[in-house]
Every structure is written in C-alpha cells, then in structure tokens.
Amino acid sequence: MTQFATEQEQFWAGEFGDEYVNRNRYDISATLAMFSRILSKAYDVSSIFELGCNIGQNLRALKLLKPGSTISGVEINKTAHANAVKDFPGVINGSILEIDPASVGDVDLVFTKGVLIHINPERLPEVYDKMAAIGRKYVLISEYYNPVPVTIDYRGHDQRLFKRDFAGEFMDRHPNFRLADYGFVYRRDPVFPRDDATWFLMERK
C-alpha cells in the first residue's frame, strides 16, 4: 500500500476505508434535499469538485440537480475510487493533502462533506488553502461542528474524528470569502433524516 504522511490518511486508504465503502451505500434523497437548498444560494454553478468523494454518493445527487455540470472529485481509498469512477471518470485516486490545485483547475464550487473531521488537524490549513485555490466562486464545508476543537472516539479508534469550527477557520484564513448561507441537517427530520451536521456555503467576495 502507498505510504502516506499521516496516520489518518493511512487509515482511510486501508482496510477500514474498504469497510466504510459498504456502509456508505444509502438512499440519496436526504442528500438531494440538502444540496437543493445549498444550490438555491449558489448562482451560476456549472463545475463542482469534491474533496473526499468516496463512492460518489454526493456527486450523484449533484448530477441530478445540475445535470449539465462538470462534476468530479478526489478519493484516497482505491475501492471507493473504483466505484466512483464508474459514473465520474474524472475522479482522481489520491490524497487530499497531496493533490495539486493546479491539476484540478478552477471550479465554481469545491466542497467537503464529512471529510475534514477525519483529517489530521495540523494539516487543515493546507486543505483550506487548496479549497480556496480551487473554488472560483464557492467553497462549501459540511461537517460536524463544535465551537472549540475536540477529538472524538470513532468506532473504537482514537485520533480519527475531530470536531471544530472548520468554516470559521477557513474564513479567518481566507477573508476574501464571506458566508453566503448555512444550515443544519438533523437525524430526527421527519422527511429527510441524516446525521447531525452543519453546512456552510462561502462565496468569494
């Protein structure tokens, strides 16, 4: 297996990431509902790139909502990538920390959804910089939120899930982006339940 710079990358590229692929197959109706609200505040989006797309569930939802758009991403796990690339041939197999923004180019919307929580916190500034470089118009961050950084046990594994104010940190580091909209997805939603998570849409000024 490829050797990565952080334990977290190695974790997701390996056996645990393979097992996650089987758990990540779900009905995308709630994802469609969330992205439809987000896209209602994101204008003239015709190209989208996801950091950490896994098997492409989010990309499939976005393709339904924006059928004429160019949609792609990057995924570290080879098994997940093999699934995603069937529908999205442009998906790259590699680490977010290693990808060169120049190889992606400028896209209208770049996003993460449940991915920053699994990245080594010391490397987050690099990811924020990559998102700012790739996102020509919008950056979307959809993650578990906490006002201060905390580390949570993740399925019996330590140092594998981190909560913090990712969007706030991104805007502090890149003040040329402003908050355009934000929302919360709730596990008890009577129509479209999903894991409790926040999303923040940021627009380039």
Image (tube, rainbow, N blue to C red):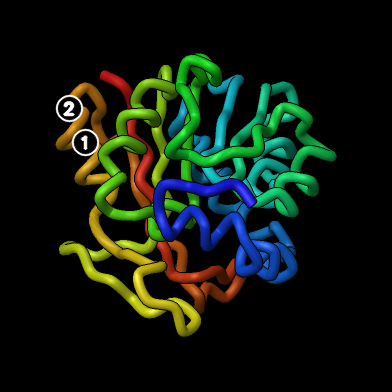
Q: What residue type is labelled 2?
A: Pro
Q: In this view, does 92 lie to the left or right of 41?
A: right
Q: What residue type is labelled 1?
A: Met
Residue assigned mark 1: 171
Looking at the picture, does residue 158 appear above or below residue 102? below
Looking at the picture, does residue 46 appear above or below residue 63? above
Could you say where residue 18 lies in the image, as x and y percent from the top left? 69, 63
Which residue is drawn at the image coordinates 30% and 64% (left, top)?
A: 163
Please count the marks in the image: 2
Which residue is drawn at the image coordinates 71% and 52% (left, top)?
A: 80
Q: Nearer the viewer, residue 19 or 202?
A: 19
Determine crowd level at label 2: few under 14, some 14-19, many 20+ residues with C-alpha closer than 10 A: few
Contact between marks 1 and 2 (CB within 8 A): the answer is: yes
Could you say where residue 168 lies in the image, as x and y percent from the top left? 21, 45
Which residue is drawn at the image coordinates 71% and 49% (left, top)?
A: 78
**Is residue 169 in view from this perspective?**
yes
Specify the farthest residue to the right: 86
Which residue is drawn at the image coordinates 84% and 40% (left, top)?
A: 86
Q: Which of 23 and 3 is in front in this view?
A: 3
Residue assigned mark 2: 175
Could you say where residue 12 lies in the image, as x and y percent from the top left? 55, 59
Q: Judging from the image, what secondary structure is the residue with disc 1 in? A: helix
